[in-house]
Image (cartoon, helix red, strand yellow):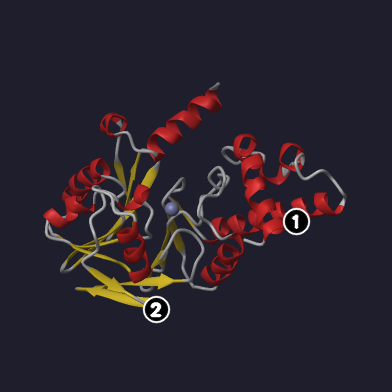
Amino acid sequence: MKKVMGLIVLLSSLFAGAAFAQSASYSTLEVTKDVHVVTGPGYNAMFVVTSEGVIVADSINPEFASRMLEEIKKVTNKPVRYLVYSHNHRDHIAGGQVFKDAGAVLLSHEEAKNAILKKPHPDVAIPDFTWSGKKYALTLGDKTMELVYFGPNHGTGMTVYYLPKEKVMYLVDIVTPNRLPFTIIPDFDPDAWVSSLKKIEAIPFQIAVFSHEGPIGGRAEVVAQREYLADLKAEILRKMNNGENVMEIPNTIQLPKYKDWLFYKEWLPMNTWRIMLGIIMGY
Ligand SMILES: [Zn+2]
């Protein structure tokens, strides 16, 4: 029952009932000097204070964005100058208008903007400025935030944020520490995801911030995410090669190494369907 309630709470936050969010608590943690993470119901978002203003990474939803603006004001009286969208998914980038009204320029990878334009939503403000290719260095005052695109892994135009001087990496959706990937692993390309994680591991960051769970960790969480995907795929292949009925594999699979991760029992069958269908159908 406790786990069922946990699922309901998580789903409530994922699908962002404003009433739920209003009663929820928000708090801010200092990751390292001038780098902060705001935690709210089901989600985290990051902001960086520079000598010339604030850079925000993701607005989440209108309620989260308003509460985050209040949290930022507790830390600095400098204005928010940029809001950067991590990817096109509405559950991370709604509420951008709150920051735009406060004077911020909205920024995303051009592929994310194209996807946003294809499925517009009243809560998602259109980016004012886009970048393209693999990397864009956003410099404001005394800070540089690298926006890095590793190709398709989750959503469209997925941006990884890296502060090279501070050695802080902010990872949205592609690493969720100590928790199974969400349900049917929606809008992920698992193989491309694994290769992105390998590239991320090669970057000399010292601290990682996560959009779900965490919110603060390091390289070990990135490695664990990649290993989970490899272990899941290997176990599915082992069972398929054993001649097990594929319709039964999601019900019988076990990965005891991960039994303490959140939603192990609930989501392992759904995770298995996604990876197994990818193996069978080649997507
Ligand atoms: Zn997403």
SS label for mark 2: loop
Image quadrant in which you'd find residue 70: top left
State left or right for residue 134 relative to residue 119.
Answer: right
- Residue to which mark 2 is pinned: 133
Q: Is mark 2 within 8 Å of ligand 1?
A: no
- Percent position (x, y) of residue 239? 81, 49
Instruction: Choose between 221 and 42: the one closer to the eye.
Output: 42
State left or right for residue 38 relative to residue 280.
Answer: left
- Residue to which mark 1 is pinned: 234
Image quadrant in which you'd find residue 266: top right
- Residue at horizontal 66 percent and vertical 46 percent from the top: 273
SS label for mark 1: helix
Point out the image quarter for the N terminus. top right
Outermost residue, right direction?
242
For disc 2, the neighbor class at 10 Å (few under 14, some 14 to 19, many from 20) is: few
- Percent position (x, y) of residue 141? 19, 73
- Percent position (x, y) of residue 163? 36, 69
Q: Which amino acid does label 2 sit on?
A: Gly
- Percent position (x, y) of residue 67? 22, 42
State left or right for residue 261 relative to residue 255.
Answer: left
Q: What residue type is labelled 1?
A: Ala
Q: In this view, does 98 lie above or below 139?
A: above
Residue 72 is at least partly visible in this image: yes
Label number found at residue 98: none
- Residue at horizontal 16 percent and vertical 61 percent from the top: 104
Earlier sequence position, callout 1 versus callout 2: 2
